[in-house]
Image: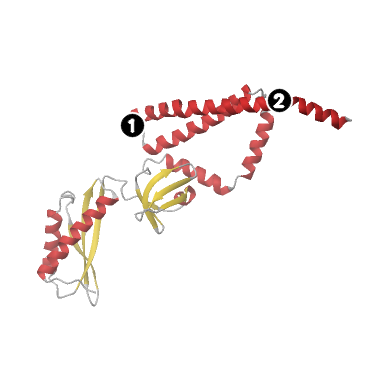
């Protein structure tokens, strides 16, 4: 008898539950659209006007998006007739359980993401290298960093990997030093090699005059000696680095051929 009464009471409340669900869904959709169409573009426009760094801008927009979702859910529940504040204890318990299931890796990635996002020397568009990988940062979230390799492959790297390993950022400064070693036989005229390398560096429009290019003998052994040329390029990107070095090497190779200078094997 008791079960029959309970089932009847549940059936009586089904229309109420149905309309509460409808109100919740419609309200959440409206709040979400207002947030994405009005609030997010407004925040982004303000950040652009203030010339906020693209990496920081992306992080702020992700936080704004999360706030929109959270506030929208609370407001939609309230409009649907759910006692949100009365259910706060249950909500807190649910959040505690969720946090308990979170792993150390997730926490480490999140903390790493905070450090990366707030690091002014680590930005979207930078060329970075770590371990055996390198590429250009395409996106930074609070969990992962996405890097586009120079073979056009996309690597998704957990932030904890980047914060616990040495990461090289060749374009963090305004200039970049390029150096290369040439192995030479002992019978090669080293002075002629020095002159060719310095002349071609001086003729190269992308190589800086200050600091000036330099050439040094860096190694000698029983079969050969090694000459290293060093020069600087301004405001570097990976593409400019590759283009400048390639252009320089092609010219040097042509001059070596004309002078009969061969590199040691």
Location of residue 211 in the rendering, given as x and y in whole percent from the top left corner: 19, 50
Residue 82 or 188: which is nearer the viewer? 82
Left or right of 33: which side holds 255? Answer: left
Q: Earlier in the sequence, mark 1 or mark 2?
A: 2
Left or right of 15: which side holds 195? Answer: left
Location of residue 51 in the rendering, given as x and y in whole percent from the top left corner: 33, 31
Location of residue 89 in the rendering, given as x and y in whole percent from the top left corner: 68, 30
| Quadrant position of residue 150 | bottom left
Residue on which the image places disc 2 = 15
Q: Local crowd at mark 1 within 10 Å, few (<14), some, or many (≥20)?
A: few
Colour scheme in use: secondary structure
How much space separates mark 1 and mark 2, taking CA atoms? Answer: 52 Å
| Quadrant position of residue 11 | top right
Which residue occupies 61% across, 27% down?
24
Which residue occupies 57% across, 48% down?
104
Query: Marks 1 and 2: which is nearer the front?
Result: 2
Residue 215 or 3: which is nearer the viewer? 3
Q: Local crowd at mark 2 within 10 Å, few (<14), some, or many (≥20)?
A: few
Residue on which the image places disc 1 = 51
Which residue occupies 44% across, 33% down?
61
The image shows residue 230, relative to residue 186, as above or below, that is: above
Which residue occupies 64% across, 43% down?
100
Location of residue 172 in the rendering, given as x and y in whole percent from the top left corner: 32, 46
Pointers 1 and 2 in contact (CB under 8 A)?
no
Describe the element under mark 2 as helix, strand or loop.
helix
Question: Most extreme residue toward the bottom, as rendered?
Answer: 222
Describe the element under mark 1 as helix, strand or loop.
loop
- Name the quadrant of the C terminus: bottom left
The image shows residue 68, relative to residue 204, as above or below, that is: above
């Amino acid at each position: 008898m008791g079960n029959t009464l309970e089932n009847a009471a549940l059936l009586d409340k089904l229309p109420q539950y149905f309309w509460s669900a409808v109100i919740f869904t419609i309200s959440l959709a409206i709040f979400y659209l207002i947030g994405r169409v009005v609030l997010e573009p407004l925040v982004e426009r303000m950040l652009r006007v203030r010339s906020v760094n693209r990496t920081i801008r992306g992080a702020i927009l992700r936080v704004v998006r999360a706030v929109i979702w959270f506030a929208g859910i609370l407001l939609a529940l309230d409009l649907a007739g759910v006692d949100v504040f009365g259910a706060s204890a249950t909500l807190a318990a649910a959040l505690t359980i969720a946090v308990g299931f979170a792993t150390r890796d997730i926490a480490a990635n999140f903390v790493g993401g905070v450090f990366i996002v707030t690091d002014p020397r680590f930005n979207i568009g930078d060329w970075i290298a770590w371990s055996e990988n390198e590429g250009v940062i395409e996106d930074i979230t609070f969990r992962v960093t996405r890097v586009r390799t120079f073979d056009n492959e996309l690597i998704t790297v957990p932030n904890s990997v980047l914060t616990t390993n040495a990461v090289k950022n060749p374009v963090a400064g305004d200039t970049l030093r390029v150096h290369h070693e040439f192995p030479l036989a002992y019978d090669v005229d080293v002075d002629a090699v020095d002159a060719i390398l310095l002349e071609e560096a001086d003729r190269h429009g992308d190589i800086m005059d200050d600091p000036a290019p330099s050439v040094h003998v860096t190694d000698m052994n029983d079969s050969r000696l090694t000459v290293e040329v060093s020069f600087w390029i301004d405001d570097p990107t990976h593409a400019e680095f590759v283009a400048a070095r390639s252009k320089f090497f092609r010219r040097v190779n042509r001059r070596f051929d004309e002078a009969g200078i061969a590199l040691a094997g």
